[in-house]
Image (tube, grey):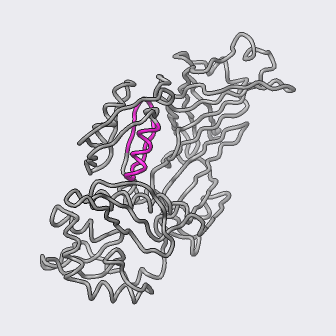
Amino acid sequence: MGKARNKYLSLIYNGVDIWKDLSEYIQSFSYEDSLDQSDTISITLSDRDLKWSRTWSPEKGDVITPSIILENWNEEGEKMTVPCGTFLVDDFSFSSPPFICTINGVSAPVNSCFKETENTKTWESATIKLIAGEIAGKYGLELVYESSEEIQVAKIEQDKQADSDFLKSICEKYGLGIKVYANKLVIWDLKQYFEKPPIMVIKPEMVSKWNYNSTMQGVYTGVKVSYTNPGNNKSIDVMIGTEERLYKTNQKADNEADARRIGESALRNANRKERSMKLTLPPRMSLFATANVELSGFGNLDGTYFIEKISHSLSGKSYDMQVSLSCISQNNDNKDNELKTDDPIKNGSQYIVQKGDSLWNIAKQFYGSGTRCKEIYELNIQVIESEAKRRGRTDSNHGYWIYPGLILQLP
């Protein structure tokens, strides 16, 4: 007879391993690994001996480091560990009958000033990486900055904001994700993460329950971002996308390149929940928030999805994961129109448009400056506009809409 599956927690509480003392009291444990907010844990304990409400009473700010451990889960002899990170006790409650204690924790620096103390400071001619590094250093956090681009800001002011709120606002402005995990301040480029290959193919037979939602609410076709021309002090609007459903933003940019980055980021964030999916499935340790997966066998819902959040739930003999996804691209009839090639450059003077390309990025790739996208558009205006109309659009919005397989002449 094979060894039975086994699951349990490792719980380090204020530096002390308390699992052996605690295991008989734990009724349930949940852990959320999330993209848009701090990770959280929740522990529900039986308090029949009144230990938690008396001698073991928790305190706000206590430090909990939990890990989920699975033995013989997929095969005999296998042992898997899911480190959840480090959490501060955020709140706790007691109820009766029966006597229950619930402890909730949030992933955050040990120094609560990161989220609570309002600060004022002005940065000039700085990069987001430099700003984040300075703030991370204040709290003893290691900065992990995962973006190939150094984003320069001419001037930005932190006006009576907590450092966490200030950093989150500038990251959202420029399409960056941010979270605190295991004493690290992690910042990453959402667009680059969307372009990563899927780490797993998920099929219906792997899932115990799923729910799909498609909505037009909060879905936009374009956004305008303005900046001031330093030569004549006039305000210039940069249009990203089309005006059918215009996203309103009051964000100001330093220049055209900055406006495009801000506009594309705003549009991407606003439209992330256009097509969403929730899956409930047995635990798979390789899945984590910010990874991409491929859904296959779900019919018209097939495609590449981005993991927004993973919720781990343990209670009694059960352990389930709920995975929240947003669709990046669907597998549709356009596949036949895409020209596949291992080498996008042809004869040194042409470029075959790939999925996810923009004229701005193509210009930046070949010439080091996205502003040369106008030259590419003007040289290829006829084929770009013809393809846009063939795809059902009135025009390409000055080259914003380009499609995989289109062959562009390079200046």
- Viewer-proximal residue, 135 or 38? 135
Left or right: 368 as drawn, with respect to 185: left
Left or right: 116 as drawn, with respect to 251: right
Residue 181 at least partly seen:
no
- Tell me which residue sits at (40%, 71%) in the image: 241
Residue 312 figure quarter: top right
The magenta span reads: 165-187
Location of residue 281 in the rendering, given as x and y in whole percent from the top left corner:
62, 53
- Image quadrant in which the C terminus is located: bottom left
Q: Is residue 176 magenta?
A: yes
Location of residue 165 in the rendering, given as x and y in whole percent from the top left corner:
47, 38
Location of residue 71 in the rendering, given as x and y in whole percent from the top left corner:
57, 36
- Image quadrant in which the N terminus is located: top right
Q: Is residue 159 magenta?
A: no
Residue 227 figure quarter: bottom left
- Viewer-proximal residue, 6 or 345? 345
- Tell me which residue sits at (22%, 61%) in the image: 232
